[in-house]
Image: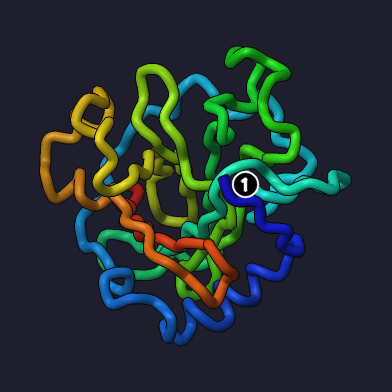
Amino acid sequence: MHRAPLPRRRFLAASLAAPLAAGLWLPSSLRAATAVLTPRQSEGPFYPVAIPADSDSNLVRVAGRSEPAAGAVVQVFGQVRDDRGRPLAGGAVEIWQCDAFGHYHHPRDRGGRADPNFQGFGRATLDEQGRYAFLTIKPVPYPGRTPHIHFAVSGPGVERLVTQMYLAGHPQNDRDFLYNAIGDPAARDSVTVAFEPAPDLGPGIAAGRFDLVLGRSL
């Protein structure tokens, strides 16, 4: 497992101001945006009971703790648009996931055993182009589930979306009931993300692009 002692805010400037704005270091396979409406999925039982005091977009560093989270550090980034292709400027995106050992920060999931150095939940405001970026750990499987990260996105003029992001090529995808409940192959592909090395972010760090498309409110 990779531990990366990254400063708490540094990745925001590196990921949004440079790579996302210019798209210079990203492989071409990570630049293409999806036009498929993102499928809805279950929120699951482990959305935080209370939003943690430290809930920024760097999940591998927790305020007041000297050690980084266990796990392989990755960046998840993308753009959120409505079904007309308009960026969801000023919207909010939240993510939550288990730690590197398969535990959530939630009292219903073996409470108190989650990695105290992993934030477990993050929240970001979409910029004027609907972009976001999180520094987190590569999701891992736990009994009954393939690796995934939960997402919730909301903003003016769109219906709130809750979905899950999956790892491309993971062998447990074929047996995951929620992943396979997405019947449309294009929709399933839209929540399946490949990670590739991102040397500009640091040695050993990979990045994956997850674009989301939300339907408009009635």
Q: Quadrant of residue 196?
A: bottom left
Q: Can see residue 6? A: yes
Identity, as a three-letter code, of the amino acid under mark 1: Gly
The residue drawn where x is 42% and y is 82% is: 23
Residue 175 location (% of width, % of height): 22, 25
Left or right: residue 175 compared with residue 126: left
Residue shown at the point (24%, 23%) measured from the top left: 177
| Left or right of 82 in this view: 93 | right
Residue toward you, 217 or 76: 76
* Residue that appears at 14% across and 50% down: 186
CA neighbours of label 1 inside 10 A, class few (<14), some (14 to 19), many (20+): many
Tell me where residue 25 sits by quadrant.
Answer: bottom left
215 relative position to 189: left or right: right
Which image quadrant: the N terminus?
A: top right
Determine the residue located farthest toward the front in the rendered image. Answer: 1
Q: Position of residue 11 (x, y in %)?
A: 64, 68
Q: Quadrant of residue 44?
A: top left
Q: Position of residue 169 (x, y in %)?
A: 24, 46
Q: Residue furthest right?
A: 64
The x and y percentages for residue 46 are 54, 24
Residue found at x 65% / y 76%: 13
Foreground residue among 128 and 29:
29
Residue 80 seen in the figure: no
Left or right position of 97 against 59: left
Q: Is residue 14 above or below residue 108?
A: below
- Callout 1: helix, strand or loop? strand
Q: Nearer the viewer, residue 104 or 90?
A: 104
Colour option used: rainbow
Q: Which residue is mark 1?
A: 122
State the count of labels: 1
